[in-house]
Image (cartoon, helix red, strand yellow):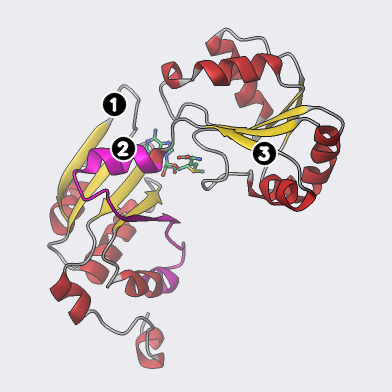
Amino acid sequence: RGTVVLAATPIGNVADASARLRALLADADIVAAEDTRRLYDLANRLGVHVGGTVVAYHDHNERNKADGLLDRVETGATVLVVSDAGMPTINDPGLAIVRRAIERGLPVTCAPGPSAVLDALALSGLPTDRFCYEGFLPRKHAERVQHLRMLQSERRTIVFYETPHRIAESMDDLLDGFGADRPMALCRELTKDYEEIRRGTISEIRQGVIDDPPRGEIVLVIGGASDEEAAAAAPATLSVDELAVL
Ligand code: SAM
């Protein structure tokens, strides 16, 4: 039997590619890549020749493709799973093949490496001993408000992924949801030449977003609720009246 290997790829700085990633790119029988062009681009930049077959494996086909790939694992193939950047399965494809591999009793392992969650958390200066990862906030305003309400009494440090075109609205909602004074960090273009970390209160960072809109890829890290904030938090769900005005 072969193995499924999830491998993290650089999130901006190609020098973060591990020796193990290089070896896997060269030696895997099959590379299941979120975007095959980006995979070849990475391999070129690393100076690695991809030896195996490259197949597209993305959000839209991962459930259908998983079993076919696992059939190959059953007959001895190493299947490398990579996404466009960072760790597969973290807001990226990969979960379907992990689940099916577990169900079918086939080996699955990981070649760990860069992921924006941990990079941002470590640089935030906020407590790292307990944190929760929230992925992207909901797109719709009402759902976002509802979601932030649910997190109002969360005591762990909270990590969100964000995009430049929604950051201004999200900062408004974060201010409403968590108040002006919570400490936070806005982490932008991590590992790249223009990496920038803005640290301050929610209201300070919000003002900065208005004055100097951040571009590129963004992670927001928000301090957890204090005892007083957790005690004072509003009920986790919005009332019908509150929903009506959103
Ligand atoms: N699998 C990836 C990981 O492990 O971090 C995340 C993929 S998700 C589709 C893309 C989001 O991750 C971006 O919108 C941004 O929020 C975050 N991200 C990825 N690379 C980043 C970087 N270099 N700097 C800041 N945020 C980044």
Q: CA distance from mark 2 to mark 3?
A: 32 Å
| Disc 1 element | loop
Q: Quadrant of the C terminus?
A: bottom left
Q: Mark 1 or mark 2: which comes first in sequence? A: 2
Q: Looking at the image, tell me whether mark 2 or mark 3 is earlier in sequence order.
A: 3
Between marks 2 and 3 in the image, the one whose residue lies nearer the viewer: 3
Numbered mark located on residue 194 in the image: 1
List the residue tagged with mark 3.
Answer: 108
For label 2, the residue is 188
Cα distance in 3D space between marks 1 and 3: 36 Å
Q: Are marks 1 and 2 in contact (CB under 8 Å)?
A: yes
Q: Is residue 143 left or right of residue 63?
A: left
Q: Is residue 139 above or below residue 54?
A: below
Query: Mark 2 and 3 residues: CB-CB less than 8 Å, in contact?
Result: no
Magenta highlight range: 117-145
Q: Quarter of the image for the N terminus: give it.
A: top right
